[in-house]
Amino acid sequence: MTMGEYSPTTLDLVRDVLDTQMLDELRDPMGRVDGLVLELRDGAPPRLAFIEMGGVVLARRIHPRLGAWLARVRGVTPFRIPWERVRNVGLDVEVDICRDDTPAMTIECWLRDHIVRHIPGS
Amino acid sequence: MLKKFFQVALGIVTSVGGFLEIGSIATAAQAGAAFRFELGWAVALGTICLIFLVEMSGRLAAVSKRTIAGAMRERFGFTFFVVPLIGIGIVTFLTLASEIGGMALALQYATGVRFQLWALPVAFVAWLLLWKATFGVIEKGVSLLGLVTLCFLVAAVKQHPSVTLIAHGLIPSIPASDATHYWFIAVSILGASITPYLFLFYSSGAIEDKWSVKDLPVNRFVAASGMTFGGGLSLAVLIVAGAVLFPRGISLDRAEQLPLVLSLSLGRWGVALFAASLGIACLGATLEIGLALAYQLAQGFGWRWSQDLKGSEASRFTMVYTVAILLAALLILTGIDPLKLTVLTMAFTAASLPLVIVPFLFLMNDKRYLKEHTNGWFSNAVVIFSIVLAFVLAVVSIPLELAGS
């Protein structure tokens, strides 16, 4: 047991990781850490398993029913990034995946392809 | 050295162009028309508070490399963050509609064609500038054109107003009559000066320009001199209105009366100069507010954001200002009175200030973000005093004013 002093080698999950800006392998912004998921294991302490992302996660943080409603309406589930893919946590949380391969860019790409690209001068 | 000089000069020009918009022009003019120089203190207090807030937002960006919206979500979590996001979002949207109304009114003064018909064309021009121009072009272009608003200063000096009376107005006083309207206008002036979009915009600009701790002295100087200059222009509007409208008993209730501020003081060119000043000031504000709304959402949700990206590289960012400007223009198209909308929006802004300023002050006193550059007790005290005053006055006077009219 140690006293709860912050040191450069420890992280406070809620303060330093939750809601932090996420960057993909090319350091492009891909949203924020919307949720953190612990995995419960038999005979072993819980383990930090995933970063969760998406509007459903955010809605659920405001109220579970709002989250359930949004999940039903949009027909999506939260997107999870395994904690093992995290490369660095500092000013931003850096992960070694490409954001275009994730649902994090679904709305961005939809808007680009269906609206913004059709505006002259884009 | 020369680069630094230009940076400072540009900062000052920016705030001259950026400070004055329909909110400050309309509230200062109404104050002067109804109470002569008595409400000068509200302009002064609002300006002083804004100096501190703008300096803080630049300091937060330079030291922590975070924008206000981003830091606020990180520090307080999403469930808290949605409250200021929605609250400030609503008043900022109404301010955007007021500015589009201001541009439309300016064209009505210039051409005689009703402002509703101008709502969509002016909104389109503003949108086109955001769509095509870079941050630098917007900042410098609008700021330089905004220097036309210096005509308010010329008009104020030409009236040879009594310096004693003006100085007297800088000290808060209890009005002899019409106390409800007096406090309501005071609240609107505070709301028009301490507009959240201004320092949200400023902190984003500081990140885009990659400020560091080295820039702190310049930041302090630009905030102080720039906002003083901008506040001085607001005061000039109040003085002209107090000198030419108050003695004639013109109370500026109707939007058509606004140009009287300059036509009665500068003569033949007055209406044209007023139309130009209002139009350019509101165009600048429309661009800043459109961007501020998009910045706020993009930073809060971690999207890519920068005015210098092509639209297709930041689709969500682009769509936010596009939709906001369109909806704001539609609101003006309904024929809602831009002057009434403006004054009421400014009062609502004052009431909503604690939503964003209280968490902002927590950030500014947090060593994990500001290191050794946290706020001193004096800046905390000035801002807390102004915000509490603005909030209490707003909560008391808005219902009374609405019930009375």
Image: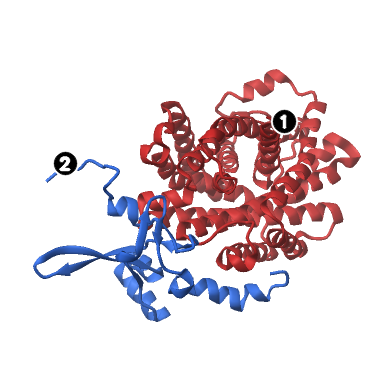
Chain colours: A blue, B red
* Residue B28 screen position, x and y as percent: 67, 38
Query: At 62% from the left edge and 33% from the top edge, which residue is drawn?
Result: B222
Disc marking residue B47: none
Please state which of the two labelled residues, at mark 2 or mark 1, is closer to the viewer: 2
* Residue A73 screen position, x and y as percent: 41, 80
Left or right for A83, reference B346: left
Q: Work out whether residue B210 can be spotted.
A: yes
Which chain hosts label 2? A
Which chain hosts label 1? B
Q: Residues within 10 Å of mark 2 (few under 14, many from 20)?
A: few
Cβ atoms under marks 2 and 1 closer than 8 Å: no
**Res B127 → quadrant:** bottom right
Judged from the image, the secondary structure of the residue bearing numbered disc 2 is loop
Q: Work out whether residue B234 can be spotted.
A: no
Judged from the image, the secondary structure of the residue bearing numbered disc 1 is helix
**Res B185 → quadrant:** top right
Left or right for B190, reference B146: left
Residue kind at label 1, given as amino acid type: Ile
Label 2: which residue?
Answer: A3
Q: Give B231 or B218, whichever is nearer the viewer.
A: B218
Query: At 75% from the left edge and 61% from the top edge, which residue is drawn?
Result: B125
Distance of label 2 from label 1 (alpha carbons): 61 Å
Residue kind at label 2, given as amino acid type: Met
* Residue A118 screen position, x and y as percent: 67, 76
Q: Residues within 10 Å of mark 1 (few under 14, many from 20)?
A: many
Left or right for B312, reference B75: right
Label 1: which residue?
Answer: B239
